Image (cartoon, rainbow, N blue to C red):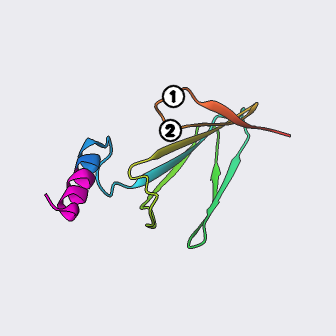
Amino acid sequence: MNRLSCVLLIFGLCIGLSNTKWNEKNSVFFKNSLGWNNVLKVHCISNDDDLGYHFLRPGGIYDFSFHDSGGFIVHYGKKNFWEAKDDGIYFTHGKEVPKLEYMWK
């Protein structure tokens, strides 16, 4: 087996064994779990896109999906869940219990 065939075989096995689908979009979810009448303002911006401001009432959810822009590090199908609660902002990829990432000042 030549070197190129070996590399392609290993690459194919890695993709096949991955728990995500090839070129699946990444997803980001924001949830407002703040107390009554507290509106959460969400503003997502990158080098290429500005998704604008979104105002979430208690219990409201805002989500969007995107493809990785390329490069060597790719995370096809990654899910990111952010939840604003009264004590701070929590994060999880959905497979573990949400962890407090940022406390309110």
Please say whether residue 8 is one of the residues in the magenta stretch: yes
Residue occupying the far front of the picture: 2
Which of the 4 image quarters holds residue 66?
bottom left
Q: Residue at x 51, y 28 (%)?
A: 96
Give the left or right position of residue 29, taking residue 75 as reference. Answer: right
Give the left or right position of residue 5, taking residue 36 as reference. Answer: left
Helix or strand or loop: what does disc 2 sit on?
A: loop
**Vertical placement of 27 versus 102: above or below?**
below
Quarter holding the N terminus is bottom left
The residue labelled by disc 2 is 93
The residue labelled by disc 1 is 96
Give the left or right position of residue 29, taking residue 40 as reference. Answer: left
Q: Which mark is residue 2?
A: none
Amino acid type at image mark 2? His
Q: Residue at x 43, y 57 (%)?
A: 74
Give, as a single range, the part of the protein colored magenta.
1-12
Amino acid type at image mark 1? Glu
Q: Position of residue 46 (x, y in %)?
A: 60, 66
- Crowding at mark 1 (Cα within 10 Å: few <14, some 14-19, many 20+): few
Q: Are marks 2 and 1 in contact (CB under 8 Å)?
A: yes
Q: Residue at x 21, y 56 (%)?
A: 6
Which of the 4 image quarters holds residue 91?
top right
**Vertical placement of 76 versus 87: above or below?**
below
Give the left or right position of residue 46, taking residue 66 as reference. Answer: right
Q: Position of residue 28 (x, y in %)?
A: 51, 49
Residue occupying the far top of the picture: 97
